[in-house]
Amino acid sequence: MFETTSLGDVAGATECRMHDGFHAYEDIAFIEAIDPVTRQPVPDGEVGELVVTTLVDRMAPLIRYATGDLTTIDRSPCGCGRNHARFKVLGRASDQILIEGRSILPREIMSLVEVHTETRGALFQIVRTDREMATLRLRVGYDVSRLTSPEASLRLRLHDQIFAALGVPLAIELLDEQELLKLGPPHKIPRVTKA
Ligand SMILES: [Zn+2]
């Protein structure tokens, strides 16, 4: 399976057989990663917002178009032989939360939640009251019919495992996943919510 994505409305971008990021077509677009707050460029390999400038399009000459996507850019040689830089799409800049300086995105939480049988639907929300917060607040839906132990022990299991992975203060609220499904089908549930 190969993923494709948009290179900031300038072009498309696809993975190569190495499956290690999307190759940007750098002969038609100039790519940068910038700090979403300071708007200053970040070094390759660090998380920043993807900014794209078209080099050939005279009809829509986008200059430093800020995509709103968080990315890391890798300019090291790729195993496929292409010389064009690769970038990874980590999530939307507007979904990012900083807990004790550590960046957290819904994508990371998903893989941590879906490993438990009760929560394998990966139905969760991050409660984001501010971009920078002291505690990561998660609302996690579980399948009531799969619950094999008291709810408190599921919460503890989730807490210990997510804390071990992320290392940030964490508060988990559990609820029947049917409550979250009232917000929409799994791919439409807002992963980041204000309350
Ligand atoms: Zn490649």
Image: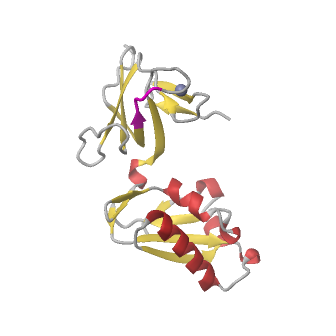
The reply to whether residue 123 is visible in this rendering is no
Q: Is residue 179 above or below residue 77?
A: below
Is 29 within the magenta? Answer: no
Which residue is at a point 60% across and 77% down the rendered structure image? 175
User: In the picture, residue 142 is in which quadrant?
Assistant: bottom right
Q: Is residue 166 above or below residue 152?
A: above
Q: Which residues are magenta?
A: 73-77
Which residue is at a point 60% across and 85% down the rendered structure image? 152
Q: Is residue 137 left or right of residue 149?
A: left
Q: Position of residue 189 (x, y in %)?
A: 58, 59
Q: Is residue 113 above or below residue 172?
A: above
Rendered image coloring scheme: secondary structure
Which residue is at a point 62% across and 28% down the rendered structure image? 17
Task: Name the residue at the right extreme.
Answer: 145
Dominant secondary structure, magenta: loop
The reply to whether residue 52 is visible in this rendering is yes
Q: Nearer the viewer, residue 192 or 136?
A: 136
Which residue is at a point 41% across and 16% down the rendered structure image? 27
Q: Position of residue 69 (x, y in %)?
A: 42, 42
Q: Position of residue 165 (x, y in %)?
A: 49, 64
Q: Position of residue 161 (x, y in %)?
A: 55, 70
Q: How many marks?
A: 0
